[in-house]
Amino acid sequence: MACGLKICLMVFVVGNIEALVDGAPQVPCYFIFGDSLVDSGNNNVLETVAKANNLPYGVDFPGGPTGRFCNGRNIADIIAEHLGFDSHIQPFVIAQGQDILNGINYGSGGSGILDETGQQLGARISLGGQLENHQTTISKISTILGNNQSAIEHLNKCLYSVGMGSNDYINNYFMPEHYNTSRQHNPNQYASLLIQQYSLRLRALYNYGARKVVLFALGLIGCAPYELKRNIGLPCVPHINLAVNLFNNKLKVLVDNLNQQLAGAKFIYVNTTGISTTMGFGFRFSNAPCCTVSTGIGEGQCLSQQDPCPNRNEYVFFDAFHPTEAANVIMGGRAYTSQNPFDTYPVDIRGLVQL
């Protein structure tokens, strides 16, 4: 079912009111792993061109730029609000004290499942590095709560979301000038390699206490403004989207495997491609960036201090890669409460936290 912007915004508001009725979050903590789609400031302290701590990023965010690759809230922020948290989950680089009991955002722009992914951009925290940071957090939680068992019991109740793989294509496989992966693997082989590595990382996360885990599929990378600029004349780039679909299909199978093989595990799959395909009808511009974007290393990010488009709610993309807050509201809302049977599998986030 297609969802217009006004209708989806209403769904978001109603969902938030419902989540906040009892005044407490639906889960005690929310841990976020991912790339620039969820980064909320971890890259600010890194030597990298993948940074978003200056305008026009954050133009609509309270207090201005924070490191979010968006004009306002990213999808992790939206989900946290649906869960009933009264403040956004803090990034790893600044979270401290009792606040870490609420969860941590480990997201890092430019990062991927493979450690090498995004290396041409500079420093970034791969999924493996994010898991190492999570181990540090677990140690601190054990200290706060008094022992390891109490920490594990706390972690078992948390929600975890993981969204990785986009950069393994954008800043690896489809960047042959910097990486050999496309010469070493055909698309199916590469998708299998990524899923194999992903599975190892997700099983490690499970061993650290995660039980309720949201896995985000990859969006239609071949329809992003960045790829359209590199492939002028196409409405989308078919071979890129076909490669991404191979990954997504294997990821959905992985969800079943993890649920069957890991005792007490409850993994779900968010169909990012399906949601983004239908939500485009609520926007006027679905294939152009709202801001003026850069060229060269870091191509596709907003040029610093340049005014973005004034009608940001009419755009799917803020820069050449990342959604606007308006698009994140819809994506996060439908991940939390699915609007059709294909949005999530086997349940939505709302159903997951109730299990």
Image (spheres, rainbow, N blue to C red):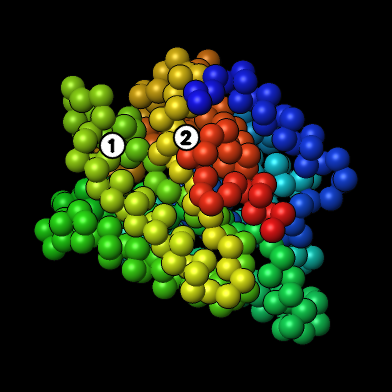
Please name the amino acid that badge 2 sits on.
Answer: Ile
Task: Identify the residue at image location x=79%, y=37%.
Answer: 18
> In this orientation, which residue lies closer to the viewer: 116 or 84?
84
C-alpha separation, residue under disc 1 versus residue under disc 2: 15 Å
Q: Quadrant of the C terminus?
A: bottom right
Q: Is residue 263 left or right of residue 19?
A: left
Q: Quadrant of residue 232?
A: top left
- Up-down relation of residue 118 to residue 305 (above or below): below
Task: Identify the residue at image location x=72%, y=83%.
Answer: 148
- Up-down relation of residue 271 to residue 30 (above or below): above
- What residue would you read off at disc 1? 222
Q: Is residue 34 left or right of residue 253?
A: right
> In this orientation, which residue lies closer to the viewer: 23 or 245?
245
Instruction: Tell which tag, 1 or 2, sits nearer the viewer.
Output: 2
Residue 81 seen in the current view: yes
Please name the amino acid that badge 1 sits on.
Answer: Gly
- What residue would you read off at disc 2? 275
Q: Secondary structure at mark 1?
A: helix
Task: Identify the residue at image location x=52%, y=30%.
Answer: 327
Q: Position of residue 166 (x, y in %)?
A: 36, 49
